Amino acid sequence: MTRITTAFGFHSTAAEVIAGVNLNGKRAIVTGGAAGIGLETARALASAGAAITLAVRRPAAAQTIAVDLRQSTGNHAIDVRPLDLSDLRSISAFVAAWQGPLHILVNNAGIMALPQLQRTPQGLEMQFGTNYLGHFALTIGLHGALRSANGARVVSLSSSGHLFSPVVFDDLNFDFIPYTPFGAYGQSKSASALLAVGITQHWASEGIFSNALHPGAIATGLQKHTGGLKTPAERRKTPAQGASTSVLLAASPLLNRIGGRYFEDCNEAQQVTRRPEDFTGSAGYAVDPDNAERLWQRSLELIAGETHLPQGSAIALPASSQA
């Protein structure tokens, strides 16, 4: 399989990547789209004409951001909807309210390095439950909308942090393994990379493709539990640069009908066999098709009890009776 490279790179911005792309008539959801690289991703997609939904945990605060986006892009098709990715009931409610096709889903929101073990309302380790399983449930629930778009893309935000840990299938929730903030974060981001592989394996025949990415080191609220960004200045990106790879995967014609890959700096990452000092590259376990399928099936089991997903279904996620 030939590695994909582009003319863009480390210093490219989202505006540069989206230049010349026309998204008129397309609909996009960006989770966590009111801050950081999610905001810059939404801005770029809106500037190309897409109708944008900012799916956020604090919708009241995001309304001001939506006003700014409308003014700065000239695109008035920007709305805000509540979504708490840590709670499957909130995801069920979001899915139930969505109508019509969905062309672009950017699974962007996330949390990092919680200092203590926390659990979601459904009892899952919080980073795995929010960063990965919440997005899995959202994507599964929106499958019908993605399919009806007749050519949809799902962007899965992973991280170089995936190099800290594979998915530990026998102990996803740290019931036995001692909890570490970055071990849990690494597992969640390996799972996020595998989500892109699984989506492509299951849905490419329906025109739905997905890729994962590492956005780079960007100073945002993500580092609130780590004392701020520690990356050397020369390896840091602005939010607009950090959003560039997300925008490439979401909208560039260079990625038409390509999926199951892992990107960084707007190019497909090299696979590595051990964690490099500069934390570049993708680990084989994060793009492995067998791992992706195992995680897909386990994830269906995890969401089925809470959301009443029909046995064996990968079509729709009905609203939970608890929503």
Image: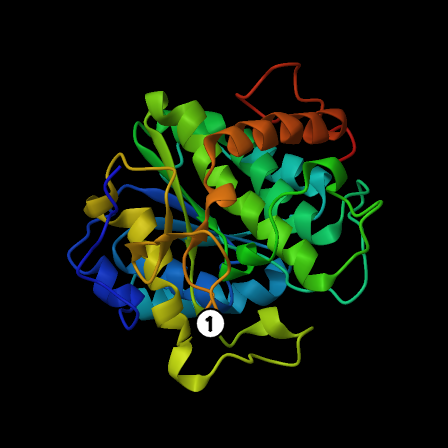
Residue at 54%, 33% (x, y): give it.
291
Instruction: Using residue 171 as the reference point, say whether residue 2 is left or right of it.
Output: left
Q: Place residue 239 in its image quadrant.
A: bottom left
Picture layout, residue 90 above or below residue 297: below
* Quarter that holds the C terminus: top right
As drawn, the residue found furthest toward the bottom would be: 233
Q: Residue at x 34, y 37 (%)?
A: 259
Q: Split into 4 quadrants, where in the image is the N terminus?
A: top left
List x then y, in percent, for residue 266.
Answer: 29, 59
The answer to which quarter of the image holds residue 196 is top left
- Density class for disc 1 (Cα within 10 Å; few <14, some 14-19, many ≥20) is many
Q: Which residue is mark 1?
A: 217
Relative to 15, is 100 on the left or the right? right
Q: Where residue 16 sits: x, y (%)?
A: 22, 66
Q: Is residue 82 visible?
A: no
Toward the front, the furthest residue is 273
Give, as a three-letter code, the residue at label 1. Ala
On screen, 65 above or below 318? below
Name above or below for residue 267 compared with residue 308: below
Outermost right residue:
176
Q: Position of residue 175 (x, y in %)?
A: 84, 45
